[in-house]
Amino acid sequence: MSEQESLRSSARNRGGVQRVEGKLRASVEKGDYYEAHQMYRTLFFRYMSQAKHAEAKELMYNGALLFFSYNQQNSAADLSMLVLEVLEKSESKVENDILEQLAKLFSLMDPNSPERVAFVSRALKWSTGGSGKLGHPKLHQLLAVTLWKEQNYSESRYHFLHSSDGEGCALMLVEYSASRGFRSEVDMFVAQAVLQFLCLKNKNSASVVFSTYTEKHPSIEKGPPFMQPLLNFIWFLLLAVEGGKLTVFTVLCEQYQPSLKRDPMYNEYLDRIGQVFFGVPPKQSPSYGGLLGNLLNSLMGSGEEDEVADEAQEDSSPIELD
């Protein structure tokens, strides 16, 4: 009986939300944007005070979509932030449909707006339980796809690195290389991604991004072996990571130094990869600093250097920032 009462109560609440949404939609359609926005906020706080979290989230999400459809970016962004507030205060579980809703709101925001930056930062924090970690891999993947469609390749690459979508990352990099890069740099686009995935302990995605990129890129002849020495190095490196033999890793890095000197970051990444997968002790005084050190820290996070290699090999998920 109590379950039936709960279902009837839920149906009444849903009907109430629909009636309210109808009135608000009418206000927006008449162009009363400010009034409608204030009504949404009033209802939000009323629902929250009554612990009607599901109703509050649904109303704010649909309201944001409505304002976006009328190009009312500020009002839409404000309601989008209220969606996050509901999720935070109700301690909602991370589910795919919620992540897709957040990605939808992100995709509709003005790419150059500060509100978008604030929204994505807060959404990623919520997606990991507010622990300050990197963010849920699925949310990163959805954000990466949106940024890829906007041809914001560098930001897209960052989010792909923190997802588990090696194939999507590779296809984006093929497009990035073909549209923005030099033909002589086709190997460098994928080399950087593979090395960074390995630094983040995600060897599965590193392997997928390499195989997909080299197969799909129109300027790369079928391999392995490849015409480009750097691609052969990456191929051998992935095999060495699977084998876990330090001597193989050391000889490999020595033999391919001419190729590795093309980018000063390569050897820094390889130092980290040596620690993660081959048990190489960290340098007492890191040779890198400034921009290079900052880039490594942004990828790997602080306080990660003391992890043992055995733990690293067992965990192929993206590394987490503290």
Image: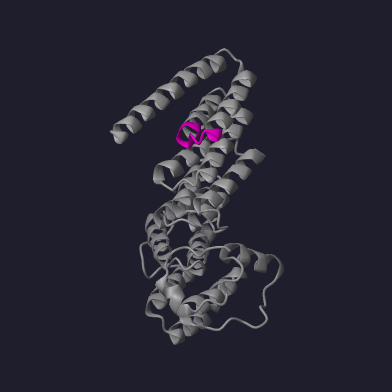
Of 41 and 166, the residue lying toward us: 41
Q: Residue furthest left?
A: 1
Q: Quadrant of residue 46?
A: top right
- The image position of residue 91, as x and y in percent, is 49, 47
Q: Residue furthest top?
A: 30
Residue at x-position 62% and y-position 70%: 264
Name the magenta segment's main secondary structure. helix
Please say if 252 is above or below 134.
below
Please say if 170 is above or below 143.
below
Please say if 260 is above or below 158.
below
Residue 296 in view in this figure: yes
Residue 256 in view in this figure: no
Specify the color scheme.
one colour
Relative horizontal placement of residue 312, taking residue 243 as reference (left or right): right
The residue stretch that appears in magenta:
48-56
Q: Residue furthest bottom?
A: 247
Of 13 and 33, the residue lying toward us: 13
- The image position of residue 88, as x and y in percent, is 54, 45
Residue at x-position 48% and y-position 34%: 52
Q: Quadrant of residue 219?
A: bottom left
Residue at x-position 46% and y-position 45%: 92
Relative horizontal placement of residue 158, taking residue 169 as reference (left or right): right
Question: Which quarter shows the C terminus?
Answer: bottom right
Give the total number of marks visible in the rendering: 0
Q: Residue furthest front?
A: 1
Of 9 and 119, the residue lying toward us: 9
Question: Which quarter shows the N terminus?
Answer: top left
Magenta-span inclusion, residue 50: yes
- The image position of residue 303, as x and y in percent, is 60, 71
Magenta-span inclusion, residue 144: no
